[in-house]
Image: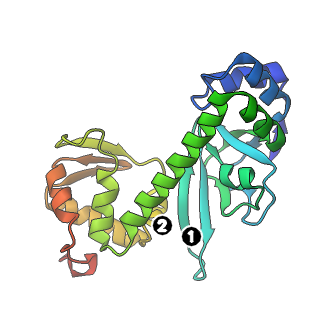
Amino acid sequence: MNAFPLSPSQISAILSRLGYFRNLQKTTLRKLAIGARQITVRRGEMVFSKGDHAPELHVVVSGQVKLFLSQANKTEKVVAHVGHGESFGIASLLLDLPHAANAVANSDSHLLLIDRNTLISQSRQDATLAECLMTDLSRRVIDLMRDMESCTPRSSLQRVSCFLLQHRPEAHLGSFDVLLATTKRDVAAKLNLSQETLSRTFQFLSREGAIEVQGRMIRVLNSQKLVDFNTLHCPPINDIPE
């Protein structure tokens, strides 16, 4: 992890181009930039570990960061993948608590770190910034609820079907594309599945004419079939014939 020296004006310019901060007042951006710094993180490098102090908000300028929990069997439970313009660590920061998960770079990444005291101070003066923070927290809660719905107490087939349907741009669309933001291994971990089970599920859905798999691009051909599979009566993936 290396510091990347930038002037406050350069950081302010970067912030203004990120969706998270795009509508903020220029004075707010300048003040946030004064208490900010940029770092570079190489792929596979830890950004922080669970239990670390959370003195700064992390914002992804480029690359991707994975948030995860370590399991007793040495596997990972993926919490989220954070990409360009998104932030992470906000809940721990606002509550002044240690980080609740680990964060590792999924690819070479540039991150902006914004000082906690500066962020809180400016959120009290700029209602737009406060709204941004509340929106981000609310979105994280909704994402976690959806992940819980996808994983338990459902079968593997239901989890994968639900996961794909969550990426449907509009409810009425019969076909759409899902570009996986990360590796299938990480997708499997997020759904609490093994990579082999995820592959078998994709193969089954392909044979059923519901999807077509092209690397990390999943082309949904018949969303109604996914809806049908996403019922309480789906068979577990182990019962699906090879």
Q: Are marks 1 and 2 in contact (CB under 8 Å)?
A: yes
Give me the residue at 61% from left, 68% from top. Answer: 69
On the image, the x and y values in percent for residue 222 come to 15, 49
Q: Position of residue 174 (x, y in %)?
A: 16, 43
- Residue located at (75% from left, 29% from top): 125
Q: Which residue is mark 2?
A: 189
Q: Is residue 13 left or right of residue 192?
A: right
- Amino acid, disc 2: Ala
Image position of 32 (left or right of 169) = right
Which residue in the structure is indicated by mark 1? Answer: 76
> Is 96 left or right of 199, judged from the image as shown?
right
Mark closest to the chain's N terminus, 1 or 2: 1
Residue 88 spot, x, y in % from top left: 64, 48
Q: Residues within 10 Å of mark 1 (few under 14, many from 20)?
A: some
Quarter of the figure that contains the C terminus? bottom left
Left or right of 172 on screen, residue 8: right
Say which element carries label 1.
strand
The kind of secondary structure element at disc 2 is: helix
Q: Amino acid at mark 1?
A: Glu
Front position in the image: 104 or 226: 226
Report crowding for label 2: few under 14, some 14 to 19, many 20 or more residues within 10 A (C-alpha): some
Is there any visible trace of residue 169 in the rendered image? yes
Q: Disc 1 and disc 2: Cα gap in Å? A: 6 Å
Q: Residue at x 81, y 58 (%)?
A: 53
Q: Which mark is residue 40?
A: none
Q: Quadrant of residue 9?
A: top right
